[in-house]
Image: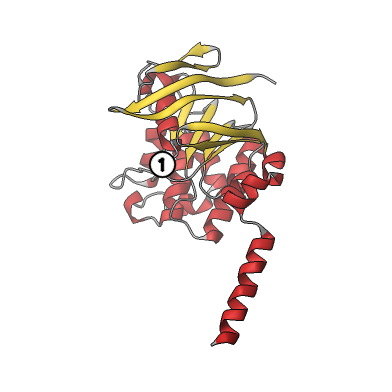
């Protein structure tokens, strides 16, 4: 497999606080790689460090064989890395189509085919293409944010918490499209997600980030079978059953 990105021993700080502690990982071409972790684990910090929004104090980040740590965000985008941020951050006063065009700002030439491709995957955006993005629902804004990222024709797409604030049904829909984009358009993705169950059933490889450190890595199939992952991220079935039994006993006591 061709290695698209390699991160080696990266340390990033917020002031005097170390947010990333020697993080190392890699992403191969055509893969979806997921990073799991609780709030405050350093997931968003890692994504910002990769895309140039934060500078690492130590370590190296290579993208397509070239170091990008220390480069400006616009330079990194032009190299083929698109960042779909946490919270979506669409331009609320621009129309859907104007938002999509903004995603292609670093490209030249005709972008009509790319817009049509986004509409193919997200038909609701085509229906509302002249509507201001600020009037979209959270799920539709997430679709727009992903579509805007696709407009850059990325070699690697960073997706930060795509299920944030979405209903289970919308989460399923978004992740089904993510899988289709990977399978049909061969988009390589690095995915940060708190919903471990959906992430591990979408991605190929996973890493677990805790307190700024990678504490576990492997194929998603291996991670799903891990006792620690089941206990802390997925929930053990037997523990759920024991909890249900305890609840039934409490009801009889009353």
**Percent position of residue 145, x then y:** 43, 42
Residue at horizontal 42%, vertical 20%?
Answer: 76
Query: Image check: 147 left or right of 186?
Result: left
Which residue is labeled 1 in the image? Answer: 40
Q: Can residue 51 be seen in this view?
A: no
The one nearer the camera, 35 or 9, is 9
**Percent position of residue 184, x then y:** 66, 37
The one nearer the camera, 134 or 14, is 14
Q: Is residue 59 above or below residue 237?
A: above
**Percent position of residue 192, x then y:** 51, 39
Counting other residues with Cα less than 10 Å from the Cα at mark 1, is it few (<14), some (14-19), or many (20 or more)? few
Q: In this view, does 180 lie above or below 60?
A: below
Residue at horizontal 38%, vertical 27%?
Answer: 105
Q: In which quarter of the image is residue 206?
A: top right
Secondary structure of the residue carrying tag 1 is loop
Residue at horizontal 44%, vertical 32%?
Answer: 47
């Amino acid at each position: 497999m061709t290695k698209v990105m390699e991160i080696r021993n990266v340390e990033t700080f917020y002031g005097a606080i170390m947010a990333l502690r020697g993080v190392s990982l890699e992403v191969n071409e055509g893969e979806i790689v997921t990073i799991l972790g609780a709030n405050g684990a350093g997931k968003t910090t890692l994504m910002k460090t990769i895309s140039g929004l934060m500078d690492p104090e130590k370590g190296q980040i290579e993208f397509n064989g070239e170091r990008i740590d220390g480069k400006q965000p616009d330079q990194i985008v032009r190299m083929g890395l698109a960042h779909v941020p946490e919270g979506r951050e669409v331009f609320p006063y621009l129309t859907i189509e104007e938002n999509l065009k903004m995603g292609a700002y670093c490209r030249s030439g005709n972008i009509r085919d790319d817009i049509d491709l986004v509409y193919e995957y997200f038909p609701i955006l085509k229906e509302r293409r002249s509507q201001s993005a600020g009037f979209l629902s959270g799920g539709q804004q997430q679709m727009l944010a992903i579509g805007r990222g696709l407009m850059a024709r990325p070699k690697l797409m960073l997706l930060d918490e795509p299920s944030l604030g979405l209903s289970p049904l919308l989460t399923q829909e978004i992740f089904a499209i993510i899988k289709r984009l990977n399978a049909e358009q061969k988009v390589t993705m690095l995915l940060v997600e708190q919903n471990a169950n959906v992430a591990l059933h979408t991605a190929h490889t996973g890493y677990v980030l805790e307190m700024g450190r990678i504490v576990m890595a492997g194929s998603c199939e291996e991670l799903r079978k891990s006792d620690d992952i089941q206990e802390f991220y997925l929930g053990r079935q037997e523990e759920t059953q024991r909890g249900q039994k305890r609840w039934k006993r409490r009801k009889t006591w009353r």
